[in-house]
Image: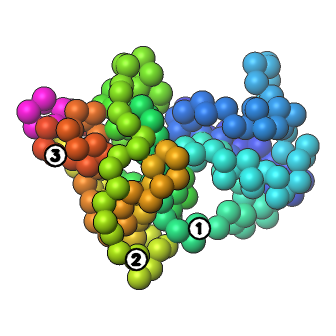
Amino acid sequence: MAIETVRGKEVVVHFNGDRCIHSRHCVLDRPDVFVPNVSGEWIHPDRAMPAELLELAHNCPSGAIRCTNADGSALEKAPRVNTVRVRENGPLAFRAPLTIDGQHAGYRATLCRCGASTHKPYCDGSHAAAGFSATGEPAVSESAPLAQRDGALKVEPIHDGPLHVSGNLELISGTGKTVNRLTETWLCRCGQSAKKPYCDGTHKKVGFRG
């Protein structure tokens, strides 16, 4: 799906349907700006202030919604703390300056951990139909505070294997607990690891194809 670009007087909204996981924050928080189930134009940037549009973008966990200033300059800024949130029975929600599979990917992305997405490494909502079950509250590991909590984060989907993540990262549970602090890790994306969200090599036994 092509990225939709809608220009307002002050802010340009970019919508990438391939990244959308239908969390519905946009249409529930500002149904006047993001108008669902209509024919024709459905995004109306001028109905909100720039700060309000930025908040809507930040509330989009998948990064499907991005905002730039009308002159093309950046409106969004990198977060001060890189995080990945483990969503209950759902994907891994990253927030960091991301490079995914060698491509710059913005500051937000939801990556598949059920193994069923047709848009790997991104989540496409297939976990619901697949009946994927995995806790969003993994066991807490002892970890020392990171010397630096921000900076570039690289996510490399290993061929038919896990997500190799390198960079400063805090792993957060669905209820906001810090589960681990890491500078390198391998996260399961086959959906069958016994140590979720971490990889334990099960992808080889089950013949996972990424």
Q: Quadrant of the C terminus?
A: top left
Q: Which residue is mark 1?
A: 78
Outermost left residue? 205
> Which residues make up the magenta segment?
203-209
Looking at the image, tell me whether mark 3 or mark 1 is earlier in sequence order.
1
Q: Quadrant of the N terminus?
A: top right
Q: Is residue 118 above or below residue 88?
A: above
Q: Which residue is mark 3?
A: 200
Percent x, y for residue 89?
A: 42, 31
Percent x, y for residue 132?
A: 36, 25
Residue under the image location 41 percent in, 82 percent down: 147
Residue 102 appears in the rendering: no
Residue 80 appears in the rendering: yes
Q: Which residue is mark 2?
A: 146
Distance, label 2 to label 3, CA atoms, is 24 Å
Q: Nearer the viewer, mark 3 or mark 1?
A: 3
Decide: few, some or many residues near mark 2? Use Cα within 10 Å; few <14, some 14-19, many ≥20: few
Left or right for 118, reference 11: left
The secondary element bearing badge 1 is classed as loop
Amino acid on which disc 2 is placed: Leu
Percent x, y for residue 163?
A: 29, 50
Amino acid on which disc 3 is placed: Asp
Amino acid on which disc 1 is placed: Ala
Distance, label 3 to label 1, CA atoms, is 31 Å
Residue under the image location 48 percent in, 65 percent down: 82
Left or right for 113, reference 59: left
